[in-house]
Image (spheres, rainbow, N blue to C red):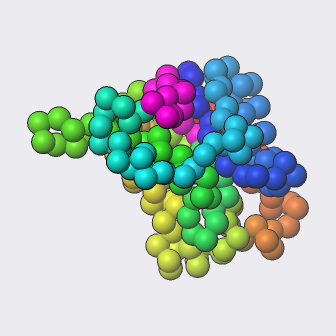
Amino acid sequence: MKVHVIYAHPLANSLAARLHEVVVDSLTEAGHEVDDLDLYADGFDPVLSAQGREDYHDTAINQAPVASYVERLKAADALVLCHPVWNFGWPAILKGYFDRVFLPDVSFRFEDNKIGPGLTNIRKLATVTTYGAKHWRAMVLGDPPRKNATRFLRVICHPKVQVQYNALYAIDTATPQKIDRYLAQVRRKMLAF
């Protein structure tokens, strides 16, 4: 299976970087073809410009500025997001990726005056993430990142997409043992992906 990994964290010595390495290594070990996109290392521009917004609905030209990212997304059978949760949302660079790359005729289609999924090539979807907040606090606030990953992304993929959400909460107070258990859990999930 061709798995597109999208990673969003600026620091090479972070827990997110360790998780990203585990994700890519485990998927590769499991025999998948991994297309790894590190948004920061790639220099992805997350800003949706005025011209980009003007062209957003014009499917003849809207993909041109992000064509290589669209091609990689459309070539994948599965998608794995690896990122921290910041301020109860995706990092800005990842949110900008969605704003700029998830365009009409990419992530969704208008057909017969109805909106339908555009990424029907994506049959498996996973998120590997960390939170500074405790689990209960995220739940009280509605846990928007979880909802985005398990609801919003689900409806734009294949109708039978398999979705998993892997999260470690309260990382600021997590013991090394708890972090090691989470890394091992992520490894198991990616080996079985």
Q: With respect to residue 90, does 98 lie above or below?
A: above
Q: Quadrant of the N terminus?
A: top right
Q: Is residue 135 visible?
A: yes
Left or right of residue 55, residue 65 in this image: right
Residue drawn at (58%, 28%), measured in percent from left and top?
3
Which of these two is toward me, 96 or 56? 56
Q: With respect to residue 15, does 189 lie above or below?
A: above
Residue drawn at (64%, 22%), measured in percent from left and top?
32
| Residues in magenta, as a range | 64-80
Q: Could you say where residue 145 lies in the image, as x and y percent from the top left?
A: 52, 61
Q: How many marks?
A: 0
Q: Is residue 188 visible?
A: no
Q: Please tell me whether residue 68 belongs to the stretch shown in magenta.
A: yes
Residue drawn at (66%, 35%), measured in percent from left and top?
37
Residue drawn at (63%, 42%), measured in percent from left and top?
44
Which of these two is toward me, 167 or 155? 155
Q: Quadrant of the C terminus?
A: top right
Residue farthest along the front direction in this orientation: 51
Which of these two is toward me, 132 or 39? 39
Q: With respect to residue 64, does 94 lie above or below?
A: below
Which of these two is toward me, 152 or 134? 152
Q: Please tell me whether residue 162 belongs to the stretch shown in magenta.
A: no
